[in-house]
Amino acid sequence: MADCDSTDADLINAMSEHDEAALRLLYGRHAAWVSARLRRRCADTDVVADVLQDTFVAAWNGAGKFRGDGDVAAWLWGIAIRRLISRLRQASGRAAKAPTWKLYDAVDVSAEETALLTVEYSDLGTALARLSPELRVVLQATVLDGLTTREAARALNIPQGTVKTRLVRARTRLREELA
Amino acid sequence: MTQQPRTWHANEAELRALADGVAGPALGASVESHLMRCGACRARMNDLVDGVLLDSVWSAIRETVEAPRPSVFERLLRKFGVSAESGRLLVAVPAMRGAWLIGATAALLFAGGAALFASGFGLALFLLVAPLVPVMGVAAAYGGDADPSHELVVTTPYSAGRLLLLRTAAVLATSLPVAALVGLALPGPAWLAVAWLIPGLAFVSLSLAAAPFVGATVSSGAVAATWSAIAIAVSKIGDPMDLAGPAVQVGSLVLCAAAVTTILTHFRLFDLPRGQT
Ligand SMILES: [Zn+2]
């Protein structure tokens, strides 16, 4: 039986055998951060709630397909971000021809934000702060959200080739920064 | 939890900035990428995120996963244009779930087998049991207690009469071929295989006609008891073949017509709960 001591992978395993208590535990562990990450990408609370629901229902239905060695948090976020993208695309398709949604804001990093970054964050965040907005959103879509270049191109509304060249440039810049 | 040894975690202000949606791209990316590696910090997010939203989404999730998933048969029905609601009600018929069908098949096989070995008594048994199979199926399909979709029936905006007819159609569709096959396997004239058909239909329509007044379980039980008494009496004093004879056939046709007329004229009764008619 699933309980508080079960690992995430155990919970997914129990869910594939229709254990609802396992789903409840998984939701308790992951719903908060998933909703916070969704909320950063979409201001509409109703959409966030719908996508959050879709994500855990999809996890319930797809629990049998989860690879035992995979990371559950990354798996859940992979579902959530893709649901959010398709949901936003649908909504914008209905509203107008031009995309009315923006998943990744290509804005400059403010001085306050840079000051907030703790010294220990010598990884992605600090490096991202030094990139131009266009390069940064490509890294956000691919590295942070785990999208393929094809999916990132759709999410950013730019050609796939542009995603690839920007990714190469961003990586080169990052190597210089982190060296 | 972490993939590599780390001595630091996201601090309260950073997590709160992410939860409140005010973290900029760089801070947000830092905290998010840390969260993906750190279960402890993910757990700390629970106190910072809107609990009301999480609770309401959870109830929606629970409702969705508790609803039975459509079976292969249900999806097939939907492909043929049966509405999702009708499909679910049809599939909820015990006959469709197999248990009832197995019971009915066993009873018929028993009766058929008896007919093979001891022609007089066995034939009577088959002719007694076969017409009752559809009636018992209707009673099983409409009986509340053993039916997990009972709640569904109660809460569905479906008229009880339409539901009864829908389920009767389903029961007939599953039970008639089984009974006919068993009948064909019997020795004797081939028409025996279908001789019980008219009595069977008469019994179904009789119990349906009486169902709004006394309930489907009582009406089908009464029909079954009456027929059994008649069948036993006939086979004791005369020829078991009389159970499939012209008198029974004509009598059944008359009863069937009367019952159908009653159903059609009092159809609205089906919509009202028993006792208010
Ligand atoms: Zn941490």
Image: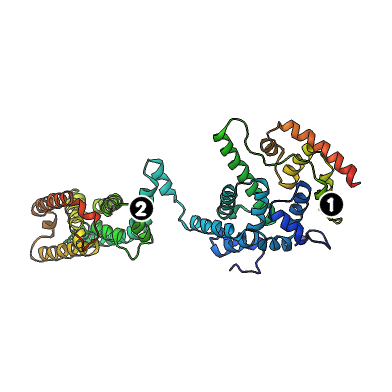
Query: Any mark on residue B132, and which?
Result: none
Whole-percent x, y for residue B208 in the image: 21, 56
Q: Quadrant of ligand 1?
A: bottom right
Q: Amino acid at mark 1?
A: Ala
Say which chain tag 1 marks: A
Comparing labels 1 and 2, the label whose residue is closer to the camera: 1
On screen, residue A153 above or below A33: above
Residues under labels 1 and 2: Cα distance?
62 Å
Which residue: 63% across, 44% down? Answer: A82
The residue labelled by disc 1 is A115
Q: Is residue A134 left or right of residue A178?
A: left
Q: Amino acid at mark 2?
A: Leu
The residue labelled by disc 2 is B89
Whole-percent x, y for residue B109 in the image: 28, 59
Q: Is residue B146 left or right of residue A108?
A: left
Of helix, strand and loop, which one carries label 1?
helix
Residue closer to the observer: A55 or A137? A137
